[in-house]
């Protein structure tokens, strides 16, 4: 999860944005039982108010990943 969030930070930075510009995220997890651990990491990257968020379990994530995170940010 940390690597995923660091990858998102790098993309945001390329556009001169930070996590404060994110308004919606979708978390896709290979195992929904990992939600508490993923959430613990996720909230470290945002200040209140947190962006809107949805999460669900999905099988067959790309490259055997345990988690994928899609974020939308505003310029």
Image (cartoon, rainbow, N blue to C red):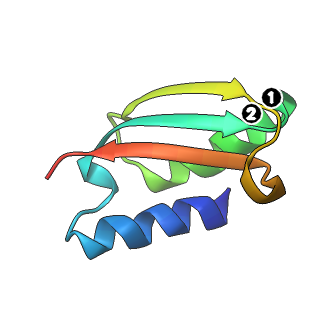
Choose mark 2 or mark 1, whichever is in front.
1
**Quadrant of residue 2 in the image?**
bottom right
Q: Tag 1: Cα neighbours inside 10 Å, few (<14), some, or many (≥20)?
A: some
Q: Position of residue 41 (x, y in %)?
A: 63, 51
Say which residue label 1 marks.
32
Towards the viewer: 64 or 75: 64
What residue do we see at 53% from left, 53% from top? 44
What residue do we see at 33% from left, 43% from top? 72
Say which residue label 2 marks.
35
The disc label shown at residue 43, or none: none
Towards the viewer: 44 or 75: 75
Asked if the residue at tag 1 contacts the one at tag 2, i.e. Cβ–Cβ closer than 8 Å, the answer is: yes
- Residues under labels 2 and 1: Cα distance? 5 Å
| Residue 49, placed above or below residue 69 | above
Q: Position of residue 50 (x, y in %)?
A: 38, 35
Q: How many marks do you count on the picture?
A: 2
């Amino acid at each position: 999860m940390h690597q995923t969030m660091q990858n998102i930070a790098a993309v945001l930075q390329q556009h001169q944005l930070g996590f404060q510009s994110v308004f919606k995220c979708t978390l896709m997890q290979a195992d929904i039982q990992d939600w508490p651990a993923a959430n613990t990491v996720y909230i470290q990257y945002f200040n209140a108010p947190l962006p809107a968020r949805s999460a669900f379990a999905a099988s067959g994530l790309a490259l055997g990943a345990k988690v994928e995170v899609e974020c939308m940010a505003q310029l």
